Image (cartoon, rainbow, N blue to C red):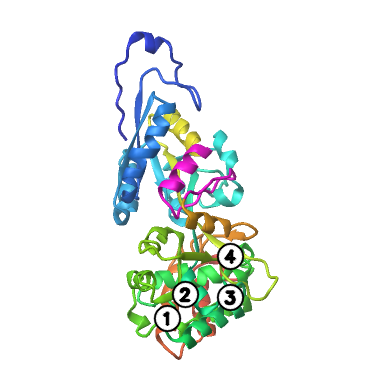
Amino acid sequence: MRSINVSVPLAVTLGVMFAGGVGAAFADPVTITLNSWRTEDIAVWQDTILPAFEAKHPDIKVEFAPINTNEYNAAIQSQIEGGAGGDLITCRPFDVNREWIKRGYFESLEGLPGLANFDKTSRAAWSGADNKAYCLPVAAVLAGFYYNADIFKELGLKVPTTSAEFIDVLTAIKKDGRYTPLAYGAAESWQLAYNGLYSIGPAYWKGEEGRLGLIDGKKKLTDPEFVDAIAAFAAWKPFLPAGQESLNYADMTQLFTLGKAAILPDGSWDINQVTSTNLNVGVFGPPVPKAGDKRYLQEMPDMGIGINAKSTHKEAAKTFLDWVAGPEFQELYVNAAPGFFAMSSKPVTYKNKLAQDFADLKKGAELTPRLALDRLSAGTPPLDDETWRLLQVMFTKADVTPQQVATELQAGLASWYGPQKK
């Protein structure tokens, strides 16, 4: 971590308070450093967010110091265990961060006033085994279905709300023959889980009931609700483009943005890309199994920020985090980075229409994170990795059934995860 003390006029020095709590002024201006893996956010932080904070807190300067995402985890571990690292650390969700908490990397945030703006579910991705908060929730991403509104209008289609309606819409597009129903392929296995199964699945395993049931061992992946979810996902296969086995993520997006496909299952982080060709794009949420069922929406905690336990400027860091917890930061960040969503209970207005449409999907829906990232992927084989692999096998081979996928996933999890060995 770096600290820069800057000389100031005596009159100013005498007029400020000494550090002693959130919001306190400092005898000498201090500089604190924020580590992040989001190198693409440099301009957002340097041009928009940090000037807004520093205008309110001229005695605290914040340096944004990103590290390439692929090197971030190893770099943070090396720096902190070597007695360095930023004063503020951007936190990965769930298992990676839980290990960092266990190693003592973070200062507890209990008592930080701004924490009251976040509910228990929002804090869960960054809580320790002691249920204390160690990172402040900053932003989440959502998953859903982008659709070409002009194609829907041309074909007389309505946005589907149930699984049967979804298949009817796909069938109608395929029968018309001019457009690919789904811009989707199996070349990149991660998005089969994140934009496919984990998006529609919660409607079958009932969100947190199913996810937490796997964690505490009361549910198994071979239970009917999980097999049904995998089967509903497998039902997409007849509506994928020819050669979908080699279609990568960028190809899928391009197929949609060129107006050749009607629907793109994807995450909110892709808002700027899917609207880059000025298509008339809408978004709808995962269909429910039958009319009247409760809606569920995948809201994946993406990033939090914690205080390095070895920081020498913890009070300044707490002042910054308490500001981050408030509506000014939340609104600045989500509008500077469309596709990322505030996790605070405070209302936020999104200036990007599609982002607001995505945010509106949360109304009346139960929110739930990705199925396999909380504790279920902390051993070998990790459930998340196995889900990627086996869904790719199911989408590239004709003779692999949803039941076989579920059976192999369950066997892998039960081989190392205690609650599933019962």
Which mark is nearer the camera, 1 or 4? 1
- Dot 1: what SS? loop
Closer mark to the observer between disc 2 and disc 3: 2
Q: Main secondary structure of the magenta part?
A: loop
Q: Is residue 222 visible?
A: no
Of callouts 3 and 4, the N-terminal one: 4
Circles 3 and 4 in contact, beta carbons < 8 Å: no
Above or below: residue 88 compared with residue 271: above
Query: The disc labelled 1 sits on which kind of residue?
Result: Tyr
* Mark before the other along the chain sequence, 1 or 4: 1
Considering the numbered disc 4 on the image, is that residue within a helix, a strand or a loop? helix
How busy is the neighbourhood of tag 3: few (under 14 within 10 Å), some, or many (20 plus)? Answer: many
Q: Earlier in the sequence, mark 3 or mark 1?
A: 1
Q: Is residue 278 magenta?
A: no
- The residue labelled by disc 2 is 151
In the rendered image, which residue does mark 4 sit on?
Answer: 211
Disc nearer the start of the sequence (4/2): 2
Q: Are marks 1 and 2 in contact (CB under 8 Å)?
A: yes
Q: Find the distance from the CA under tag 3 to the CA under tag 4.
A: 10 Å
For marks 3 and 1, give the one nearer the viewer.
1
- Mark 3 belongs to which amino acid? Phe
Residue 61: % across, % down: 35, 29
Give me the C-alpha separation between circle 1 and circle 4: 36 Å
